[in-house]
């Protein structure tokens, strides 16, 4: 039996510590991991729990992230609760196995502390790794601060392991800004947390020899498509489960989560759509804009996959001008997030003006002032009735101003 | 553990059949013989993981499976990590008492081709051995990437032609020596490492049983003649394997705890390597006069290696 861990009602935790505590409380059976900045402390904290008897499960320190996710796949199919953590290059090395894990419908929880992808090598936070996972068939949830990193990590087990979902889940937090910033976090008691997450009830357990299972079969043009379509359907069908788990979590914690978090959107004329810590920065900016009489609001997906197309559309359809912020190098196109939000808005009656801002790459600071400038651009667009700038701009970039793609409206 | 009797081949070959005859491996493929021997040499519950390769693509084509036990394939390189992960989960659940049957013994086995073992999956294999997972890794060594049509691997011997190290007017085929995987795995300090062959079925079954019984990571390289890429008649698989072991191209031996070496088969008449080479299309070009030196080099390498094995066995160090 694991030793009792003393917790205060209010702790001061950074995002990494919050994620490690959630894994301890969920009584993970196997944690297989490999260190990489900025998620290393998650693995180290867990190592300290192991060394001091605070966890009963197995801790497998593998030789790479690819092996970490591979061991997670083997462990998960063997019928217990599995979690790990990574960032950036480690995430990139895992990608092959991310697809294999979701294809085998294994409810692994992966804490991703977002960081830029090389080259140039950079250890700071941006969303390049998060975007790299977006077609991998995992549920992706996004925490904007340490409390949320803790809360969502607990919810992740309950969502992924639900028998009508059976999918792996990523919980994202921003490298350094969340992962290394100590904040007040209100944890559940160990008992309340475990009661909330519940026991895992494995499906197709490799260690149940009364019913042998084959994992990772071969399919070609005869069956591959049906499998992939079913997997997509499982992701789409996870929506009500995610909502139920959020509702249940509210009951035990008092903290309310939604697939899309809207801030001052009831009467908003202009909006920023963002992910990660930028959401909180933009909310402060929105307040300041309101002091200047500009009706600003912020929309942020809490659940990035399955993409909340409907909720994003409903939150933004009456806005005049929207800025979608991509913290990942767009690689010769509009930002990926911009494209997804735009697709949702294209289905609305009013079709708000939508512009794209690339910002914060490699940890470049994004301040309240930057968000206010973006709101000001949106206000100008709203007043003009058309996009007054290039559709894609760069916020916070040194050197000559960069802009791409022109509008034909207005 | 529950050991199946290995006295009688007929009885043994039909014992505890957890690997179905229905699969799409080529007729004459040695992979299935080796796998069947492994599955038949124990009654314990088995979790088997398999790297991508001929074995995997031929035994789990949806909606069919040849595996009447728990089986997993993830990718080309990571069967060792998958077995390690499953083994860790077994330990965790046994401790917590959440297994369906907490007392039944379970063994973990990973299969890989030479491609996944010597080349792309080597890191995963090495890592799993360093961590000491309680599992057995079996390499089905057919000395090429058979599943993708016969490209070179670092297990391909000098002089063999493969599609990516071809014999031609300017080449006698592969130029580099085969990687000594058995020595490398023994150097990990693994408690049991061996090289075995399906023609010597008794020593192979005994070696498998030893590996399964031994706690910790055990490694076995098995010679697995591939009629398609080695170019011989499918009915000759075992006679080709006889030539492999009697020319000492594939010596049969084990290494215990990283150092104690035992030779498991000493041919009464050691045959010249030409007999082995001449029986396979992949070495045909070596019999041209200009390639005579390659055969000489192969023979020299064999002699030196056999000498080394005997000395190590004698030295008991
Ligand atoms: C990451 C990756 N690279 C390449 C391949 C293509 N591939 C599949 S099997 C194989 C060769 C298998 O050779 P080996 O391991 O020797 O097994 P065999 O088929 O010979 O039994 C290759 C190159 C793959 N599936 N995955
Ligand atoms: S190609 Fe070779 S290894 Fe592959 S199934 Fe055929 S005989 Fe076996
Ligand atoms: Mg091969």
Image: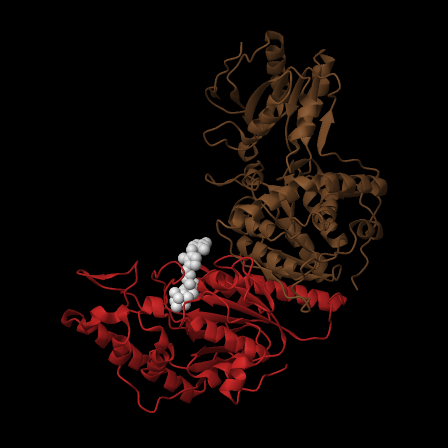
Chain colours: A brown, B red
As drawn, B97 above or below A17: below
Q: Can residue B214 be seen by looking at this rendering?
A: no
Drawn side of residue B172 relative to residue A317, left or right: left
Residue at position x 84%, y 44% in the image: A9
Residue at position x 44%, y 75% in the image: B222
Drawn side of residue B267 relative to residue A234, left or right: left
Residue at position x 36%, y 65% in the image: B144
Instruction: Residue B252 in the image: state x and y as whole percent.
Output: 41, 82
Q: Can residue A17 be seen by looking at this rendering?
A: yes
Q: Which image quadrant is residue A53 in?
A: bottom right
As drawn, A260 above or below A173: above
As drawn, A117 above or below B231: above
Q: Quadrant holding ligand 2?
A: bottom left
Q: Quadrant of the N terminus of chain A?
A: bottom right
**Residue at the limit of the structure toward the left, as seen here:** B289
Instruction: Residue B219 in the image: state x and y as whole percent.
Output: 50, 73
Q: Nearer the viewer, residue B53 or B265?
A: B53
Drawn side of residue A314 relative to residue B236, left or right: right
Q: Nearer the viewer, residue B131 or A17?
A: B131
Residue at position x 65%, y 44% in the image: A234
Instruction: Residue A394 in the image: state x and y as whole percent.
Output: 52, 23
Drawn side of residue A232 relative to residue B185, left or right: right
Instruction: Residue B164 in the image: state x and y as whole percent.
Output: 30, 58
């Amino acid at each position: 039996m694991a030793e009792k861990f003393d917790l205060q009602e209010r702790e001061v935790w950074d995002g990494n510590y919050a994620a490690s505590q959630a894994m301890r409380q969920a009584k993970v059976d196997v944690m297989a991991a490999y260190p990489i900045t900025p998620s290393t402390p998650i693995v180290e904290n867990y190592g300290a729990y192991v060394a001091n008897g605070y966890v009963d499960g197995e801790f497998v320190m593998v030789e790479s992230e690819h092996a970490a996710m591979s061991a997670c796949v083997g462990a998960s199919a063997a019928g217990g609760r599995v979690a790990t953590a990574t960032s950036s290059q480690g995430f990139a090395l895992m990608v092959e196995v991310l697809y294999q894990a979701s294809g085998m419908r294994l409810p692994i929880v992966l804490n991703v502390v977002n960081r830029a992808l090389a080259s140039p090598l950079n250890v700071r936070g941006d969303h390049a790794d998060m975007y790299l996972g977006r077609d991998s068939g995992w549920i992706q949830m996004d925490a904007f601060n340490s409390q949320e990193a803790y809360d969502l990590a607990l919810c992740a087990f309950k969502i992924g392991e639900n028998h009508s979902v059976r999918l792996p889940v990523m919980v994202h937090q921003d490298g350094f800004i969340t992962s290394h910033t100590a904040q007040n976090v209100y944890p559940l008691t160990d008992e309340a947390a475990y009661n909330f997450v519940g026991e895992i009830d494995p499906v197709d357990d490799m260690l149940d020899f009364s019913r042998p299972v084959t994992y990772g079969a071969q399919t070609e043009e005869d069956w591959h498509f049906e499998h992939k379509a079913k997997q997509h359907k499982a992701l789409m069908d996870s929506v009500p489960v995610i909502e139920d788990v959020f509702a249940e979590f509210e009951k035990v914690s008092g903290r309310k989560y939604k697939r899309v978090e809207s801030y001052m959107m009831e009467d908003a004329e202009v909006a920023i759509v963002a992910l990660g810590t930028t959401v909180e920065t933009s909310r402060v900016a929105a307040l300041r804009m309101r002091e200047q009489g500009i009706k600003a609001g912020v929309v942020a997906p809490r659940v990035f996959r399955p993409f909340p197309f409907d909720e994003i559309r409903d939150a933004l359809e009456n806005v005049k001008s929207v800025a979608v912020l991509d913290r990942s190098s767009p690689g010769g196109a509009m930002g990926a997030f911009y494209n997804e939000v735009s697709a949702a808005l294209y289905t609305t009656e009013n079709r708000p003006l939508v512009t794209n801002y690339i910002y914060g790459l490699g940890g470049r600071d994004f301040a309240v002032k930057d968000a206010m400038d973006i709101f000001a651009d949106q206000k100008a667009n709203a007043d003009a009735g058309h996009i007054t700038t290039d559709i894609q701009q760069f916020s916070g970039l040194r050197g000559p101003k960069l802009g791409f793609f022109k509008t034909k409206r207005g | 553990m529950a050991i199946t009797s290995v006295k009688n081949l007929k009885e043994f070959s039909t014992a505890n059949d957890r690997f179905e005859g229905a699969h799409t491996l080529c007729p004459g493929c040695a992979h299935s013989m080796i796998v069947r021997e492994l599955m038949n040499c124990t009654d314990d519950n088995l979790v088997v993981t398999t790297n991508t390769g001929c074995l995997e693509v031929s035994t789990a084509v949806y909606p069919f499976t040849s595996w009447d036990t728990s089986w997993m394939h993830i990718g080309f390189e990571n069967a060792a990590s998958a077995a390690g992960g499953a083994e860790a989960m077994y330990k965790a659940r046994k401790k917590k008492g959440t297994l369906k049957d907490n007392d039944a013994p379970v063994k973990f086995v990973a299969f890989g081709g030479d491609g996944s073992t010597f080349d792309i999956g080597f890191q995963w294999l090495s890592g799993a051995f360093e961590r000491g997972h309680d599992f057995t890794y079996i390499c089905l060594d057919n000395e090429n990437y058979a599943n993708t049509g016969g490209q070179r691997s670092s297990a391909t011997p000098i002089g063999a032609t493969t599609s990516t190290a071809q014999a031609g007017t300017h080449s006698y085929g592969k130029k580099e020596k085969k990687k000594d995987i058995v020595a490398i795995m023994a150097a990990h300090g693994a408690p049991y490492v061996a090289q075995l062959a399906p023609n010597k079925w008794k020593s192979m079954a005994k070696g498998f049983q030893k590996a399964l019984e031994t706690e910790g990571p055990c490694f076995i390289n098995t010679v697995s003649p591939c009629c398609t890429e080695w170019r011989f008649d499918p009915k000759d698989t075992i006679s080709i394997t006889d030539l492999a072991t009697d020319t000492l191209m594939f010596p049969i031996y084990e290494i215990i705890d990283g150092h104690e070496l035992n030779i498991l088969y000493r041919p009464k008449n050691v045959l010249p390597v030409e007999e082995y080479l001449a029986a396979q299309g992949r070495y045909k070009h070596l019999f041209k006069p200009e390639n005579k030196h390659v055969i000489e080099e192969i023979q020299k390498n064999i002699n030196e290696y056999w000498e080394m094995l005997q000395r190590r066995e004698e030295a008991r160090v």
